[in-house]
Amino acid sequence: MTGSSPDFAPRVWLCQEPASPCDVAPGWLTAFERATVAGLSGFRRREYLSSRWLIRQALTEASGVPGPDCCPVDGRPVNSEHPPGWHLSLSHSHGLSACAVSATPGLGLDIEPRHRHPHWQKVVERWFTPGEQAWLLSANCCESFLTVWTLKEAWLKATRRGIARNLQTLEVYPDFTLSGDQDEGWMASAGEVGDFLVALVYRQHGNSLPSGSLLQCPGETLPVSHPAERMSPVNWLFHHPIITREQE
């Protein structure tokens, strides 16, 4: 089935990036992607090719269209070109790539390794709300900070805004309930896979909840003709609605 379905809940696909960049650009890349990757090297090339491979895996799973026939729009890949109607969000961190796909606009994904931020308190003191500062600094838990950080990053991606002056538009409370500056209808999910945290913000899809899987590392050839093997599921820790914050 091509096109999107309103009953399709968001899904997240992740993979470890290959140890070495693919020397020869895969034949399934679009002309735009081929031109882009020609100017990349090292980890940037690995990130780019891994994310494009994941996009094909995600779109194949969502639509049933064979991987070589799937592609995102040129430029920032927030939508699919073929098959049309799907919404995408990407994230990369420390050798792990991730791609989310949804039938509904308003989608943001972020991943972070646990305990990677040695000076997280300074970030909280400068950029977070007074309420978040109070409970995070009192809890003194880096993983709690990283969970909040990934949720905020996913929120800003989903609402198409940058970090500057916008981190406080989403507030996360000690029980990880949330409020934001948008209308009702948003959900937030947080989970874990291996040593990474995963945050997903999306428009509500009825009663359906997102799913997620870590895929087998594709290797340097990055084949897309067949679905990749699923290694382990995302362990979702919570799914919470984002309530509309009362305006002061």
Image (tube, rainbow, N blue to C red):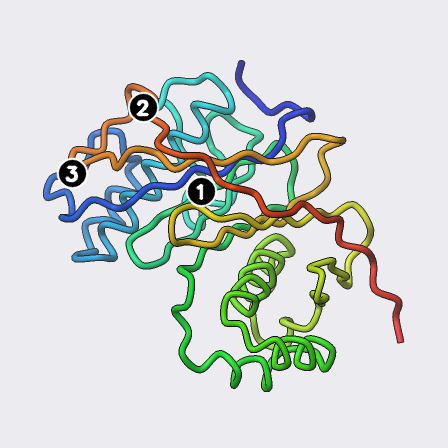
Q: State the CA–CA distance, disc 1 to disc 2.
A: 17 Å
For the residues labelled 3 and 2, say whether their Cβ atoms are less than 8 Å apart: no
Residue 97: image location, x then y, percent: 36, 48
Of the image marks 3 and 2, the number of the one nearer the N terminus? 2
Residue ranking furthest to the top: 1
Q: Position of residue 189 (x, y in %)?
A: 62, 47
- Residue 170 in view, yes or no: no
Where residue 161 appears, as percent x and y from the top left, is: 60, 63
- What residue did someone put label 3 on? 220
- Image position of 246 (left or right of 120): right
Query: x%, y% of residue 19?
Result: 16, 48
Separation of marks 3 and 2 at Cα, in angstroms? 17 Å
Secondary structure of the residue carrying tag 3 is loop
Judge depth for marks 1 and 2 and give the one in front.
Answer: 1
Closer-to-camera residue (86/236):
236
Element type at mark 1 = strand
What is the three-letter code of the residue carrying label 2?
Answer: Pro
Q: Residues within 10 Å of mark 3 (few under 14, many from 20)?
A: some
- Say which residue label 1 marks: 99
Relative height, residue 67 to residue 154 (above, below): above
Q: Is residue 223 left or right of residue 143?
A: left
| Residue drawn where x is 52% and y is 86% of the image | 122
Spatial CA distance of label 3 from label 1 is 19 Å
Label annotation for residue 68: 2
Amino acid type at circle 1 is Cys
Q: Which type of secondary structure does the marked residue at label 2 adopt?
A: helix
Residue at 54% x, 48% y is 191
